[in-house]
Amino acid sequence: MIFEWPSLRKATVTAVCADRSLQGDFQLSEADDNPTFRMDRLVVSLSPGDGTDAQTVSVRNEGSEPVSLREIRLEWSASRLGNRLDARDYVQLHHTRDFSGTSGVRPVHRPVAWSPADEPSSMVSVFSHRRTGACILLGALPPYGDCYVDIAILHAQPHRDGAFGLGFHLRSPRTIGPGERVELAHLLVLQGDDGNALLSEYADLIRQRLAAIQFVPPAARINGWNSWDYYSGAVRSEDVLANAAAANALFGDTLRYVVIDEGYECQWGIWDAGWKFPQGLETLCAQIRAEGCEPGIWTAPLMVSVYTPLYRDHPDWFVGDEKGNPFVENAGYGSMVQLDITHPDVEAHIRDTFIRLRAAGFSYFKCDFAQLLLGASTFHDPRMSHAGMIRRLFEVIREAIGADAYLLACGAPYESVIGIADAHRTTGDVHNYWSHIRHNIRSMLARWWMQGAIGNTDPDTVNVRCPETTDDRQLNRRLALNPWGLNGGWAAGREMNLEEARTLLLSCYASGGDLLVGDSIVKLKSAGTDMLAHLLRQPPVRRGVPLNLFEPDGDELPIVAAETGDPDIRLLVLFNLGDDYRTQRIPGDFLASNLSWASFWSGEAEPAPRDGEVSLMPRSAVAWWVARSRTT
């Protein structure tokens, strides 16, 4: 058990500062429960947690001048671990900081199409032995503060094909004043023989620690409609109201929220009704409620067009690059700058904006693009790092909208918003393209443990529009036609067919997360609305567990099982995400003689698959309700 904290007797410690790097070793004794390492003016300390075996890492400036810290690294090289870990023997659960990267299981010793080989995992990672299944989990626990934790792989050789070590990199670029002590992160190492079991234990620890700081996650997932996937920035108020009426007529109270996404605003940064919403936001909210739905709204709270009076009149409100020049992102809607939450006037401005939107009648808030702040370098107040800034942003938003409003963090790094947001985006934009669906199911399954632990997960939208479900000849705005590729690609390949739509719906439903419809409901035929109505009527499942996540076929042939509110009924989903016909084997515990099977889509009873094998078409999924017979 070499990764138990008492056994990690020697670590390399590096403090990376703006002007230099300081490095040395922790040399621990059996009796040393609070090791401290002094590097010039900086003191790095570890202290034991509260019964979870977590270690709290803090840093103190004992000098008389400020220190510009960049990161603290705790590393155990391959040689210090006795060269016990061989890269060829392990796969890694790679976890990205936010949804804009792809998470999944990859080999330790070579790159994959969807992830660079040298990209560290963020917040958590699991290393699983290919043959024995023995696993090691490294992770960060709440309370998450002004720091991001990366899990680094330390290859002994540049070719990465041999021994490797592990490390925690605590990224917290900020100024630490004289005499100031900063608590950076709470770190955890777990061992076991099942990667999913370790992730479940990790999720339980997160839930327990969030409860201690009085974060109450939503009781159940939410359902709704979102304008973005079909209408994108071309949405008009009449589109929103037509879909609200159709949602109420077709789905009733199974679809609660109607969310107005990008396209309603005057300009980015001016979050008020533009020319396509002439009645204004307050009237629109009342009209949505008259249709029996709750109104929701999208914003990008930090993003501001450079062509707004807001930017022209307040040049000191915005973050800068490393030279102190304006930090500009060239987005699809023009050149954007970002508000500086460390400026007190900016904090007041953001608070007033969300108080106004809440007063207009919105009860669901989708907040986007906060992750782009990570590229900025200069701020009004340098004492706070990027992680702390984004966390403060969401604290201000929560204070403004109140505890009873639903808050979705879309793009914000997870460590910045866990404990504040109700839901967290876990995938990229799904759209109605197989290239998007395939790419994002990987991330959805890798983040299965988040559902119910940090709040709800948001797998983007469920879409069914395809030639079989609508007569609409324009399924999307006109886009460039490009071939499908292994690493996904924006709108690559053709638009999805009906079988691929079912696969998308099953993956989102089995995740246990929120379900928001992304189609134009008014343009769907009954073949499409019937599929959605069936999905929305199903009882919520608890998070679906990809049983073969760490196995060789786990990426292409996931097997997902989800518990329900009834302890005797489970959902079983078999996927074939590849382009060949494949055969899946039913897990052994689903083949007991006292189980009955029913099709997910029809509800009709079916015999258990013969010989425990199921033939699957390319790009498809099948699902059953599997019930245990009750004895009297």
Image (cartoon, rainbow, N blue to C red):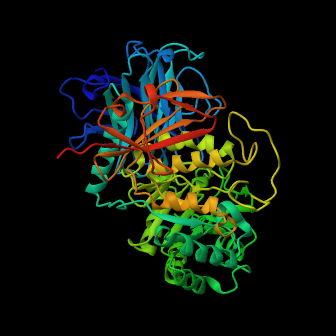
Tell me where residue 436 appears, x and y as whole percent. 65, 45
232 shown above or below 65: below
Q: Is residue 278 visible?
A: yes
Tell me where residue 167 appears, x and y as whole percent. 43, 29
In the picture, which quadrant includes the N terminus? top left
Q: Please indicate whether residue 9 sits to the left or right of residue 517 in the image.
A: left
Tell me where residue 343 appears, x and y as whole percent. 53, 67
Query: Which of the two residues, 312 or 223, is positioned nearer the viewer here?
Result: 223
Write the residue at 66% across / 60% down. 229
Write the residue at 28% across / 29% down. 5
| Residue 250 picture quarter | bottom right
Write the residue at 36% across / 50% down. 453
Query: Which of the two residues, 53 or 519, is positioned nearer the viewer here?
Result: 519
Tell me where residue 540 appears, x and y as whole percent. 40, 56
Q: Please indicate whether residue 335 sits to the left or right of residue 344 in the image.
A: right
Query: Which of the two residues, 240 or 30, is positioned nearer the viewer here?
Result: 240
388 shown above or below 306: above
